[in-house]
Image: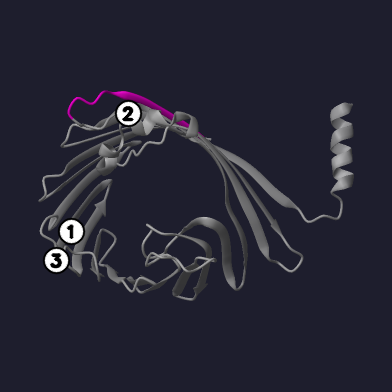
Amino acid sequence: MKNLLIATTALVATAGVAAADVSLSGAANVGVLNNGDAGSITLMYNNVTVTAAMSGETDSGLTFGASLSFRAGHDVDLDVGDLADNNQDYLYEFEDEHMATSLGNIYVSGDFGKLTFDANGVDNAHNDSFSHDVMYTGTFGALAVTATANVEGGSTSDGGDFSLKVVYSADGVTATAATDDGGEYDATLAYVVNDMLTASVNYDSNGGDTGAETAVKVAYANDGITAALTLKDGVAVNQWALALGYAANGFAVNVAVDDAGSEDLSASYDLGGGMSINAATNETGAFFVGSKMTF
C-alpha cells in the first residue's frame, strides 16, 4: 500500500512535466603494483567511482543534461608507459585526500551543435596539459569542429585561454588540424587504404627535440591481429616504434618496443558482465596485476 501511494503521488506530481532520464553507473579498480624503482615495494591499490548522469529535453527540442561524479581510493596510473609514476608516497601519504566530488559537466545541444560547461574540466583541444571551462562541438556534413575557452582569460601560460580543432573526413581520407593560443599547431592526414591497412602522417610544430616533428605511421588490423610501425623525424630518440597485438575470445595481449629501449607488455582477459583481469609490465621491472569492474 505504501509503495502504491508513493508511486501514485509521484505520478501526480510529475504530470505535465517533460520526461527526464537519470542513470547511475560506477567503476572500480583493485590490484597490486610496483613502480620498478630500486628497492621499491609491491603495493595494493583500490579505487571506486560512482557517476550519476541526467538528461532531459525542452519543448523546442533542445537536449540538456549534467553529471555528478564521486571518487574515492588510491590515485594510480595503469598505463604501461607510466607505471613509474606510482610510488608509496603517491598512493598512501595523502590517502585522506584521495576523495573527490566533481560536477562532471553540464551541456545543452541542438541543431546548432553542443555546448559543454565544466569549470577547469575541459581539455584543451590541442594540448591537454591545459584545462578550459567551455567547449563547443558541431558537425557540418563531413566537417567536425571543436573549440574550447577559458572563461576568466588572462592565463599566464600559453595554451591556457582557447583552442580549436577541425576534422574533415570523406572517401577514406581524414584531415585533422589543431591549435591554441600558444601559437603551436599540429596536423594529421590519414588514409584508409583498405579494411586492413591505414596510413597517416602527422606534423607537430613543436613536438621535436628542437622544433618540429614529423611522424609517419602504418597500421594493420585483421582477424584479431594488430600491428603498427611509427617513424619520426626531428627527434634524437624514439625515431621508430613498433606495436603488435592479438585479441580473441576475450583475451588480449599487446607488446610495444622502440629504439630508446622501451619494452612494454600488457594483457587483459574479459570475464564478461563488466569485469576484466588486467596486467602490464615494462623494461624497468614495473608491473601491475589487477581487476577492473564497470557497473
> Hey, what amino acid is under mark 2?
Gln
- Identify the residue position indicated by label 1 in the image: 230
Confirm whether the magenta stretch covers residue 80: no
The N terminus appears in which quarter of the rendering? top right
> Hey, what amino acid is under mark 3?
Gly
Q: Which mark is residue 234?
A: 3
Q: Position of residue 196 (x, y in %)?
A: 26, 58
Residue at left 45%, top 68%?
161
Q: In this view, does 128 lie above or below 83?
A: below
- Tell which of 202 and 36 is nearer to you: 36
Q: Where is residue 14 in the image (x, y as percent from the top left)?
A: 84, 49
**Label 2 close to label 3 by CB (< 8 Å):** no
> Hey, what amino acid is under mark 1?
Thr
Residue 292 is left or right of residue 266, and the answer is right
Residue depth check, mark 2 versus mark 3: number of the one nearer the observer:
2
Kindly state the secondary structure of the residue where label 3 is placed.
Answer: loop
User: How much space separates mark 3 and mark 1, taking CA atoms?
Assistant: 13 Å
Confirm whether the magenta stretch covers residue 46: yes
**Residue span colored magenta:** 38-48
Q: Earlier in the sequence, mark 2 or mark 3?
A: 2
**Quarter residue 95 falls in:** top left
- Identify the residue position indicated by label 2 in the image: 88
- Tell which of 286 and 195 is nearer to you: 286
Q: In this view, does 149 lie above or below 81?
A: below
Q: Which of marks 1 and 2 is nearer the N terminus?
A: 2
Q: In this view, does 12 lie above or below 200?
A: above
Residue at left 68%, top 66%?
62
Q: Is residue 244 above or below residue 218?
A: above
Residue 11 visible in this rendered orientation of the protein = yes
- Disc 2 packing (10 Å; few <14; some 14–19; many ≥20): some
- Disc 3 packing (10 Å; few <14; some 14–19; many ≥20): some
Residue 120 is left or right of residue 172, and the answer is right
